[in-house]
């Protein structure tokens, strides 16, 4: 069975709500994801599409939400992601523009990475050890090939490598610093390796303290939160209001989206922008 999922930027979204004084490009990102498999989800109301017997080969709503966020907010108006956001702010002082680098961990079908690739980013797609020989990377490669004459035409081919949480192979250690890290639906009811996941996030923060981590997941238990792990691993998470979806896109589960940064960098930025008010009153 083959099902296609098309994701496009939505002109009805008021992107100026997020990026004041930026010219928003209304061109569409038309990325079609081919889902190959023997059966679809048994629930007709669910967006989970089964392409195998592995959770990694399902399309989760959090992956869709993160992809919509990239198109309509984070990279809004960016048909070619040639300049990092921070470099845009200082472009008058730096003429050496470079392509944004992104990495996705626990990628599954890697929808957010393929969206970033279609926008011109240099993307690294990772999933656990053994992904090269099982259906995970096979499915990703199928979608890359399918879109090579569509939104990925002329783009930098994605790099696929194996990465298990908390395990840093020589291949992982040799990766260059990245500007963005994507992670969607890494937490399940039986997830026990939270520290391994956050250790992986921490590693990429260490090699680029200014990295932006976009973490999106479905809330499956009110008793499990990431606040403890953010504090433990020296990170700050900003909860993002999910009001950027297309009008006809309805979520069937409760989704959280966080923008995570290094706590040390955030504290430094706050200190450098703080205003000291002198007392001008008389003694």
Image (cartoon, grey):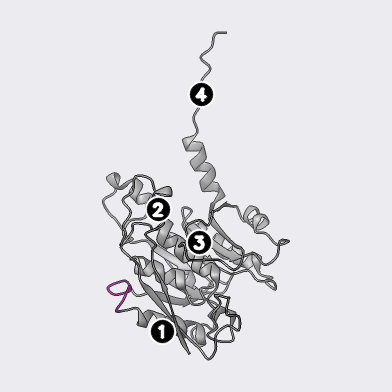
Q: Which residue in the structure is indicated by mark 1?
A: 142
Q: Residue at x 56, y 49 (%)?
A: 263
* Quarter holding residue 215: bottom right
Q: Could you tell me which secondary element the residue under label 3 belongs to? A: helix
Mark 2–mark 3 Cα distance, whole angstroms, equals 29 Å
Mark 4–mark 3 Cα distance, whole angstroms, equals 37 Å
- Tell me, yes or no, whether the highlighted magenta stretch contains residue 155: yes
Horizontal placement of 183 versus 195: left or right?
Answer: left
Q: Residue at x 28, y 44 (%)?
A: 92
Which range is magenta? 149-156
Q: Nearer the viewer, mark 3 or mark 1?
A: 1
Mark 3–mark 1 Cα distance, whole angstroms, equals 28 Å
Q: Nearer the viewer, mark 2 or mark 3?
A: 2
Mark 4–mark 2 Cα distance, whole angstroms, equals 35 Å
Secondary structure character of the magenta stretch overall: loop
Along the polypeptide, which appears first: circle 3 or circle 1?
A: 1
Q: Can residue 178 be seen in the rendering of this structure? A: no
Q: Which residue in the structure is indicated by mark 3?
A: 204
- Cβ–Cβ under 8 Å for marks 4 and 1: no
Tell which residue pokes out farthest to the front in this image. Answer: 248
- Cβ–Cβ under 8 Å for marks 4 and 2: no
Q: Which residue in the structure is indicated by mark 4?
A: 277
Mark 2–mark 1 Cα distance, whole angstroms, equals 32 Å
Horizontal placement of 187 versus 67: left or right?
Answer: right
Q: Quadrant of the C terminus?
A: top right
Q: Nearer the viewer, mark 4 or mark 2?
A: 2
Which numbered tag is attached to residue 15? 2
Along the polypeptide, which appears first: circle 2 or circle 1?
A: 2
């Amino acid at each position: 069975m083959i099902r296609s999922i098309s994701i496009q930027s939505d002109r009805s979204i008021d992107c100026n709500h997020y990026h004041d004084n930026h010219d928003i490009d209304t061109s569409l990102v038309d990325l079609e994801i081919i889902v190959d498999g023997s059966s679809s989800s048994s629930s007709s109301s669910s967006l989970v599409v089964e392409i195998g017997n592995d959770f990694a080969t399902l399309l989760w709503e959090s992956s869709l939400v993160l992809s919509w966020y990239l198109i309509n907010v984070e990279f809004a108006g960016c048909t070619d992601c040639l300049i990092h956001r921070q470099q845009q702010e200082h472009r008058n002082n730096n003429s050496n523009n470079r392509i944004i680098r992104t990495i996705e961990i626990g990628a599954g079908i890697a929808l957010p990475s393929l969206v970033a690739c279609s926008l011109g980013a240099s993307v690294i797609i990772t999933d656990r050890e053994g992904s090269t020989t099982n259906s995970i990377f096979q499915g990703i490669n199928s979608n890359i090939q399918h879109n090579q004459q569509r939104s990925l035409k002329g783009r930098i081919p994605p790099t696929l490598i194996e990465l298990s949480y908390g395990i840093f192979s020589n291949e992982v250690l040799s990766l260059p610093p990245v500007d963005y890290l994507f992670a969607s639906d890494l937490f399940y009811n039986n997830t026990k390796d939270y520290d391994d996941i956050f250790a992986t996030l921490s590693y990429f923060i260490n090699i680029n303290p200014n990295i932006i981590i976009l973490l999106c997941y479905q809330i499956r238990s009110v008793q499990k939160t990431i606040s403890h792990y953010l504090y433990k691993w020296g990170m700050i998470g900003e909860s993002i209001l999910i009001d950027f979806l297309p009008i006809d896109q309805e979520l069937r589960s409760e989704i959280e989206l966080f923008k995570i940064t290094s706590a040390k960098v955030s504290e430094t930025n706050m200190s450098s922008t703080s205003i000291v008010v002198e007392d001008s009153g008389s003694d």
